[in-house]
């Protein structure tokens, strides 16, 4: 059985295993093996040198700085935040810029525009009468990106299908005919299905609704309270000027039954209050931090990236962890004259749809794009109930378990170079791995334009499978291991504010950062980084050539 990572067992002791053929060299990697000052003074130009200099204390110091930045910069909801478009994100970018300039890199800040939205305070939804009840965020309902407050009687739109059919069949609220007889001033109750959510809201607003509740349709897999975005019939996103939100099927069907009962008995209609205050800016600034090494072949660029933004709060696991890892690796490489030019990038807007990496790639000329030979992506390191995911464009994605995207042919074979380096690292340490597509990571955008890429991630939110438990240990359900068995999570759910530094396992962060550093130094010295070769190629005169064939790992 492979060894499983455990903070209780590993404590702060990590060893370096070097395997060359039948021979093995074992050396301790901990605070006493080499000091940070010694690492800073030398050229860490081989895997053995670099890996031992990636130390937990340095990683956690960066993590603490990101946490302190979040604590000092509250979002519109009044909680610590490093979300794109907010002061905490800009402060994070400024911190990275300063560290990289101090390390001798050429640093630029790339500014791009995006659609910003944030809730102001905490949205609320309650039934006032006849059954007083405050509905619970995330489980019973979810707010939309809207701005408004309303109190009024419920009135269902036409087209509601109850009981639900086995397959989706409702198109409630999709036409103005569904609002015939609607009484202005009431709050519209609409069933999911048939058209964009935004079309339902616009129709309700045109009928005089002061608020909208969209309940899940009730078919298999469509019962929980959904989250969504409002698009009009042409597919344009917008922010409604009346409050709107989604409820579970159970909540929506209960309100519908109450309405029908009230009409049948001539009783008062169910009355609710909906408060969803938000702030939007369709043209807000966001930032990528781009740091180039002063040496290396400018025609052969290795991009090493992590997204710097959070989505709801401090964002320490997702993704201060990857940001801290590449920041520390960059510092440890400051004295190295790599064969390829190193370009470290901290992207914004990843959580909002890979916005930063899209803006960066779109800004490049065809010549500039052709000079990027490879991308390595660090997205979520240090998950407590972890997996070890190695990015591979041919693999199934993390979210759906299927292969969903076809990339240009030239990315596939070359992407296995760094992928296999990670596999060798973890195999040597006695840890399993699984291959995952880059879907949802910034590496995805590089693959789309024909640039080979790999990277690492350790998982977040739900749901860790039995197969993954068999591979990595831990428990079923939430990868973070702290908010229930099969639901919850600190990362992708708003109004929890729990993706703080305590949401990160320092031992896993250290292990995976070392593995990623091994990939970076090997690709930085690969003389054929832009080729479609399935193997790394090193000049014999380079120090790294003496370590070819060895495997370096933490154990």
Image (cartoon, rainbow, N blue to C red):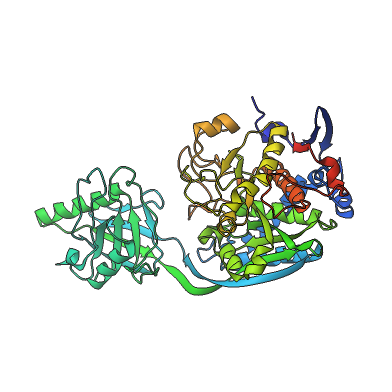
Q: Nearer the viewer, residue 15 or 528?
A: 528
Q: Quadrant of the N terminus?
A: top right
Q: Residue 405 at what x, y percent from top left?
A: 49, 51
Q: Quadrant of residue 288?
A: bottom right
Residue in the picture at 70% in, 37% down: 424
Q: Quadrant of residue 368?
A: bottom right
Residue in the picture at 15% in, 53% down: 260
Q: Quadrant of the C terminus?
A: top right
Q: Residue 374 at what x, y percent from top left?
A: 67, 55
Q: Nearer the viewer, residue 176 or 362?
A: 362
How many numbered marks have been drawn onto this rendered protein structure? 0
Q: Is residue 201 visible?
A: yes
Query: Which residue reaches farthest left?
Result: 265
Q: Quadrant of residue 506?
A: top right
Q: Is residue 373 above or below residue 380?
A: below
Q: Residue 133 at what x, y percent from top left?
A: 31, 52
Residue in the picture at 70% in, 42% down: 421
Q: Is residue 305 above or below residue 481?
A: below
Residue in the picture at 60% in, 33% down: 472
Query: Which residue reaches farthest top?
Result: 1
Q: Is residue 386 visible?
A: no
Position of 189 compared to 21: left or right? left
Q: Is residue 384 above or below residue 286?
A: above
Q: Residue 361 at what x, y percent from top left?
A: 60, 65
Query: Which residue reaches farthest bottom?
Result: 283
């Amino acid at each position: 059985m492979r060894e499983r990572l455990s903070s209780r067992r590993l404590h702060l002791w990590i060893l370096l295993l070097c395997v060359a053929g039948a021979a093995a060299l074992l050396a301790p990697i901990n605070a006493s093996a080499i000091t940070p000052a010694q690492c800073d003074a030398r050229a860490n130009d081989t895997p053995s040198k670099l890996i031992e200099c990636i130390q937990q204390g340095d990683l956690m110091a960066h993590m603490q700085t990101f946490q302190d930045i979040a604590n000092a910069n509250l979002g519109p909801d009044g909680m610590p935040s490093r979300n794109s478009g907010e002061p905490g994100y800009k402060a994070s970018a400024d911190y990275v810029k300063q560290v990289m300039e101090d390390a001798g890199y050429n640093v630029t800040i790339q500014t791009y525009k995006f659609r910003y939205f944030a809730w102001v305070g905490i949205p609320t939804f309650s039934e006032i009468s006849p059954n007083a009840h405050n509905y619970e965020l995330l489980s019973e309902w979810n707010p939309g990106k809207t701005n408004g407050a309303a109190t009024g009687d419920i009135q269902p739109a036409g087209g509601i299908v109850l009981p639900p059919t086995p397959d989706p069949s409702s198109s409630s609220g999709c036409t103005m005919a569904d609002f015939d007889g609607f009484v202005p001033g009431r709050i519209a109750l609409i069933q999911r299905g048939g058209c964009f959510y935004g079309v339902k809201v616009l129709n309700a607003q045109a009928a005089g609704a002061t608020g909208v509740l969209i309940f899940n349709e009730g078919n298999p897999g469509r019962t929980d309270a959904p989250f969504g975005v409002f698009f009009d019939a042409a597919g344009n996103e917008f922010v409604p000027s009346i409050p709107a939100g989604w409820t579970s099927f159970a909540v929506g069907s209960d309100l519908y039954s109450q309405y029908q009962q009230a009409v049948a008995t001539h009783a008062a209609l169910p009355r609710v209050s909906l408060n969803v205050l938000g702030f939007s800016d369709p043209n807000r600034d966001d930032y990528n931090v781009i740091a180039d090494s002063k040496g290396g072949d400018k025609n052969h660029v290795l991009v090493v990236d992590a997204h710097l933004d959070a989505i709801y709060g401090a964002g320490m696991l997702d993704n201060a962890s990857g940001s801290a890892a590449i920041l520390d690796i960059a510092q440890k490489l400051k004295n190295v004259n790599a064969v390829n030019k190193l370009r470290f990038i901290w992207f914004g807007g990843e959580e909002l749809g890979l916005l930063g990496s899209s803006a960066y790639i779109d800004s490049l000329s065809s010549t500039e794009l052709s000079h990027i030979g490879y991308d390595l992506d660090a997205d979520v390191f240090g998950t407590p109930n972890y997996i070890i995911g190695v990015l591979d464009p041919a693999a199934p994605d993390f979210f759906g378990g299927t292969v969903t995207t076809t990339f240009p042919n030239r990315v596939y074979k070359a992407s296995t170079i760094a992928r296999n380096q990670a596999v060798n690292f973890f195999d040597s340490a006695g840890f399993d791995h699984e291959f995952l597509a880059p879907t949802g990571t910034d590496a995805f955008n590089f693959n789309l334009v024909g640039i080979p890429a790999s990277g690492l991630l350790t998982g977040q939110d739900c749901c860790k499978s039995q197969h993954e438990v068999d591979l990595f240990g831990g428990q079923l359900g939430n990868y973070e291991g702290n908010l229930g068995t099969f639901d919850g999570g600190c990362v992708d759910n708003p109004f929890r504010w729990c993706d703080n530094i305590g949401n990160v396992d320092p031992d896993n962060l250290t292990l995976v950062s070392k593995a990623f550093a091994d990939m970076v130094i090997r690709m930085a010295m690969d003389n054929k980084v832009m080729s479609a070769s399935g193997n790394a190629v090193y000049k014999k005169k380079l120090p790294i050539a003496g370590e070819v064939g060895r495997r370096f790992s933490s154990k």
